[in-house]
């Protein structure tokens, strides 16, 4: 668990209002943009809210080295802190940096090296969930 304070709670469960859903989608958009800024590749956004209570969205990102995986995770955390005063509820894997998981409550970010991404194949595991076109999320 992280020592970051939780400034905002982005709760967008099944009975969420449109403004809460928009806020979660905006958070997802900021995450995608921060990942792109650090050359994150093969970004996939999966809307899991209809099939799971874990989160509303999963964001899957490929980084090609431990350094890049760490840089992507740091860029995401910094961008959300500066722009939205939002801090992760949980952060795992930074020591090894082959798979970093950042939990923002309604959005869970997975940054993986290609070997881990292929092995765990989260896209297939969540294949029954809706994929979001990231071109709709970036400016």
Image (cartoon, grey):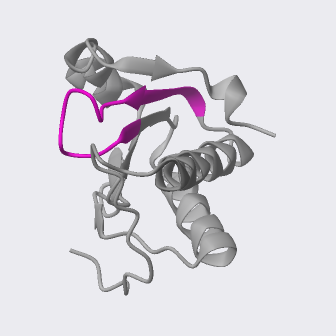
Task: Inspect this view and state whether residue 112 appears.
Answer: no
Q: Nearer the viewer, residue 53 or 118?
A: 53
Q: In the picture provided, is 24 more to the left or to the right than 99?
A: right
In which quadrant will I find the C terminus? top right
Asked where in the image residue 54 lies, by quadrant, the reply is: top left
Task: Inspect this view and state whether residue 47 appears.
Answer: yes
Asked where in the image residue 7 lies, by quadrant, the reply is: bottom left
Number of numbered discs overlaid on the protein picture? 0
Quick check: is 53 in the magenta stretch? Answer: yes
Q: In the picture provided, is 36 more to the left or to the right than 20?
A: right
Q: Which residues are magenta?
A: 41-58
In which quadrant will I find the N terminus? bottom left
Quick check: is 45 in the magenta stretch? Answer: yes
Asked where in the image residue 133 lies, by quadrant, the reply is: top right
- Picture residue at 45% right of the left edge, 74% below the top: 87
Q: Nearer the viewer, residue 10 or 46?
A: 10
In the rendered image, the vertical position of residue 24 relative to residue 63, given as above or below: below
Q: Nearer the viewer, residue 52 or 14?
A: 14
- Picture residue at 51% right of the left edge, 47% below the top: 18
Q: Nearer the viewer, residue 105 or 50?
A: 50
- Picture residue at 38% right of the left edge, 61% below the top: 104
- Picture residue at 32% right of the left edge, 52% below the top: 101
Where residue 13 appears, as percent x and y from the top left, is: 28, 49
Where residue 79 appears, as percent x and y from the top left, is: 65, 66
């Amino acid at each position: 668990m992280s020592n970051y304070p939780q400034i905002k709670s982005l709760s967008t469960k099944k009975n969420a209002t449109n403004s809460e859903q928009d806020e979660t989608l905006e958070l997802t958009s900021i995450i995608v943009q921060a990942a792109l800024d650090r050359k994150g590749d093969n970004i996939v956004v999966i809307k899991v809210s209809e099939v799971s209570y874990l989160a509303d969205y999963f964001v899957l990102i490929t980084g090609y080295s431990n350094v890049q995986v760490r840089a992507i995770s740091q860029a995401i955390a910094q961008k959300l802190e500066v722009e939205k005063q939002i801090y992760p509820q949980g952060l795992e894997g930074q020591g090894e940096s082959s798979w970093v998981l950042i939990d923002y409550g309604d959005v869970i970010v997975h940054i993986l090296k290609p070997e881990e991404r292929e092995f765990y194949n989260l896209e297939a595991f969540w294949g029954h969930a809706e994929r979001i076109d990231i071109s709709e999320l970036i400016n």
